Image: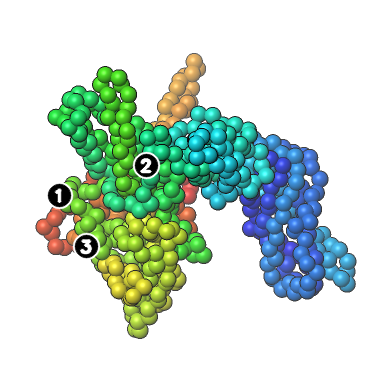
Amino acid sequence: MAAATVSNLGSDQKTLTQIRLKGSFTYDGTGTHCPFYVAFRVRVKNTLDWTLPWVYPPQSQSDYTTCNFGANSVQFQGVFQFPANPAAEYEFQPIVMAQDFTLGIYREGPFDYFTTTGGVGPVCDLSPGSVTATTVPCSATNYADGSITITTTSSEPHEFACVIPFTSINNWQDSPTFAGLEARAYTIYVRHKANHDCIGSGNKTLGVAPPEEETEEPPVVPVTSTGLYFSLNPILEVIGAAPEIVENSEVVLELSVESEHYKGDFQPVIARRRFLTNDSANFDLNLLLHSFLNKALDLPYLQAASIATRRVKQGILNYSFQTAFVDPVTKVIGAYTKSPVYTVVKGGLPLQDWTRLNFFGYLQEKKSFLTWLPKTKTIGPDQPEFLYWLNQSNTNDFIIERKYIGVVTTTYKENFALDTSSPINTLISIPVKLEAVPAHVKRIEIRLLNSNQEAISETRTFKIDRSFRRYEKFFLYENAFGVWETLRTTGPQELAIDGKDEISISGNDLQSVFAQDMQRRIKQSSGLHTPEEQEYLQGFVFSKRRYEIKGEDLLPIILQKRSYTFEPDSRRPTGYFFEYDYAYTPFTYSHLN
């Protein structure tokens, strides 16, 4: 059999007793090698002995077909059974067996081993679609004889819960049946017994509706968002008292949020109380909501094969709240009043824009992308660049129009549909370039159209600078809107390492180093920018997350000097110097160049 190599090994769908491995192998010669087998032997990571024998999964065997291997890659995947410890990590060493009908069966390998990540743990195959329920309805006269039985498509061991919406889960039970229930709406839950983070939920209404005076239906959460806010700007809710409410009464506010934007799984997360003052109580929600948005927006994919227009589900979520008054004598909480659904976006406005009270209305009016940079930006031909669009219409379908303008003008139109029935206030990440830029192209213009070919966004222009830039570097940072922006620097870079040794003197007067303090400084010049570009570089200075782009990798950096000066009246190009270091501690500094 011709020489073979195994590559692209990976794993997914881990369970307590099995793991699914997938990858490919390549033959460098020619011949007929079908069927093929991929086998593995297993050992616990960092141990010496391969304690388990070769495992041949039948799922990895191909059909009997003619395979002409001339540097061809063959894909495989299979489920490998072996006794596993959920807390351990395992190493796998592959071997490939193939059949040449003229030579018989040959074996290639074993090849270099690889390691799974995160150990072997329970698989999570629960989703709202995999959790359902059957009901036995209540009678018209007795509202406490109905039952709900929860079912799931998963065969793993689970536990179950059934509660009224907006109610915390206090008890999980092994039995999927809940009897003696009143006729009303319920939220049903299933979670994996060994992995409590693996949870699925759904909704079920039981039996006939009881009279209003006997059972109060919980407020229904609207599907569509009715407003937009920034999490770092004040979100003030003023609750006014009704005439029958006495002064100094307490107001209770219960905040509910989704776990993911437009997932619809609203859960109460926090409650606050305020006393009425001058017939009103004020609740500032922005800090409460920001704590649920502190997870960084997913970094954009820089691999050429993975660059695509995507819907963003981090850094944005829907929320609602309900309020009630507390009787000052009995301390009983009265009936709740439910708010509409609102959307909150991670980020905040610069100080100079605080006067724009209806800023999202301003965005809609100007049809602006989520960036403060001027509409024309200079980029390098290999520079990763992304735009973020906050949809404020009810349309699901968009057309992304990219014009490559040079010797000739070529227009590319990409159709993109949102995967949600409620598209308003969704966030979209749009790469400026989906493919390599031809050499004759001098600029790219990009805008969004609706299905009627009408512009729904501003037009952004990206000039392509093809001049040789010896010091060209790219940096990715989170801007004031909480989305990613790219900074291109063309100025020179200085590298320095400052070291200090702590000396000790022994009894025979010999000196030795017992501690070292090392500091690396990378001084970077941005190169020349227009006054408009220079003004908005303050977003890079104020950003909390910055990365240096190294090919398809992102290296986190920390600015050591954050000083920033700018001449607002100057019309000449200016630059900016900053010092930074990588966020990780290196063991050697030889990679600085």
Circle 1: residue type: Thr
Name the mark on residue 36: none
Residue 454 falls left or right of residue 120:
left
Secondary structure, mark 3, is helix
Query: Which residue does the numbered mark 1 point to in the structure image?
Result: 355
For the N terminus, which image quadrant? bottom right
In this rendered view, identify the residue nearer to me: 488 or 223.
223
Q: Is residue 349 left or right of residue 415?
A: left
> At 11% across and 57% down in the image, what residue appears?
569
Query: Which mark is drawn over residue 219?
Result: 2
The residue at the far left in this view is: 569
Quick check: marks 3 and 1 in contact, CB under 8 Å?
no
Q: CA distance from mark 1 to mark 2?
A: 35 Å
Residue 366 in sight? yes
- Residue 10, image x and y in percent? 63, 53
Label 1 Cα neighbours within 10 Å, binned few <14 / some 14-19 / many ≥20? few
Left-right relation of 219 to 117: left
State the SS at label 1. loop
Q: Residue furthest bottom?
A: 408
Of marks 1 and 2, which one's residue comes earlier in the chain? 2
Q: Residues within 10 Å of mark 2 (few under 14, many from 20)?
A: few
Residue at the disc numbered 3: 365
Task: Give the Cα separation between the discs numbered 2 and 3.
Answer: 33 Å
Mark 3 vs mark 1: in front: 3
Place of residue 533 in the rendered image (x, y in percent of width and height, measured from the top left): 23, 60
Q: Residue furthest top?
A: 507
Residue at position x 36%, y 73% in the image: 451
Give percent across and percent down for residue 286.
28, 40
Going 49% across and 64% down the picture, which residue do you hit? Answer: 304
- Quote the CA–CA distance across marks 3 and 1: 16 Å
Q: Amino acid at mark 2?
A: Pro
